[in-house]
Image: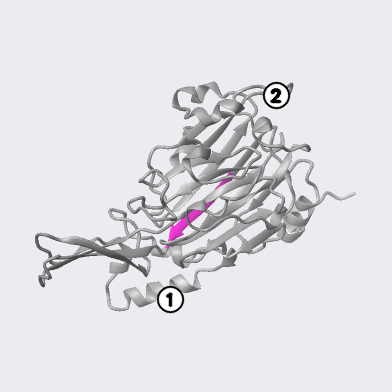
Amino acid sequence: MKGINYRSIPTIAILWAIRNFHANAQFTYPDFNQTLGLVMNGDAATTTCSNEELMISAMTSGGEMQGLYQKIVTESGGDNLSVGNNISEIAQFGHREGMDVVDLHAIIECKTRIRLTPSRPSRVGSVWYEKRLPVLTEFDTTFKFQLSGQSRTCTFHRDPTFSLKHHKSCTVHGGDGFAFVIHANPGDALSIGGKGKQLGYGGLKNSIAVEFDTWTNTQVTEEYKEDDLFHDHVSIHSAGIGTNDSGESTSLGYSRPVDLADGKIHEVRVRYFPFLQTKYFEGMSANENLLPYLKDNGEGRRLGTLAVYIDDGIKADSPLLAIPLNLSILLDLPDSIAYVGFTAATGLQWQKHDIISWNWCDSNGCL
């Protein structure tokens, strides 16, 4: 019998075989030209870069590239100024202050990606692998993401004495962020959580989320009244088998500030070790919410480690965030399997939340 030439097998056939074998799984989406095996909900959809190309053409036609930088614009002002209302507008392709110019070549040649939300207010999206996968023994997943098209917020200041003097400042800073999520919510692969600060996972039961939060916590509103970190950050949230939430009551650990929404493509690795990874011990984050999950649960269900790496930290084996955790105690998974995927949401601020590629492994052959 002649050997099989695996290179001749279409990608769609490989993905079909993978999705129908889920005792252990390994899959790779180098892009999302094929989405076999994925379930998208809410505002999530695949997209190409055609809109971005038109936008770049419009911005560069006059020889200017001003839309590619974040701007903080301050107009004339005076004394005795009071703060007025905030006005949000859609930015063209703005990003954060101090970043390098966006790589036009990378934008124009980008491949089909999953856009969890468009750059519009009050949107929410989720995407799940359609089969539940083993998560309690060990897994290793990597993905690339890009956050762009942030909203612009302008603050007006007026003199309370009705002087003609006024002051206006505008910043480009989107929201709210996205999350990598593991869950056994009753909604299965159709599950989707709340908008705004809930990042699309708030409201899911029996779940854990690694959130990438980009909301600027400078305002106190009814929707955003709970304390949160001011800067972009990565944090891990779970209420065990209860209803998950993005608030501090479910936080299991959070990272130092890290720039996530700079318009660049970032790579993330999330890995669960079925043992306490002592080499990360000095950099581990933990709080009192973790206490119920810091114990063994029988043979093969020992206290483990959940680690999150980003960009250069992947190659350096230096996680941005690591916590001690026993997933078999945190989640109720009788068959040790759960849905895995991504969620994102926008609210008073908005941006495009794009997943560009995704790789998953939970078997000895790829770990």
Main SS, magenta region, reads: strand
Mark in the foreground, 1 or 2: 2
* Cα distance between the residues tagged 1 and 2: 55 Å
Among the two numbered marks 1 and 2 on one chain, the one whose residue lies closer to the N terminus: 1
Mark 2 element type: loop
Q: Secondary structure at mark 1?
A: helix
- Image location of residue 355, percent across then percent down: 54, 56
Count how many numbered circles sit on residues in the image: 2
Highlighted magenta segment, given as a residue range: 142-148
Residue 162 position, x and y percent, is: 12, 70
Q: Amino acid at mark 1?
A: Leu
- Report the residue marked by disc 1: 54
**Looking at the image, which is closer to me, 161 or 223?**
161
What kind of residue is marked 2? Asn
Left or right for 262, reference 274 = left
**Res 111 quadrant in image:** bottom right
Mark 2 lies on residue: 297
Q: Is residue 302 left or right of residue 307?
A: right
Compared to residue 137, the image places residue 76 above or below, namely: below
Residue 310 in view: no
Q: Is 261 included in the stretch rendered in magenta?
A: no
Q: Quadrant of residue 81?
A: bottom left
Q: Is residue 316 above or below residue 14?
A: above
Q: Residue furthest front?
A: 161
Residue sitting at x 59%, y 63%:
44
- The x, y position of residue 84, in whole percent, is 25, 64
Q: Quadrant of residue 37?
A: bottom right
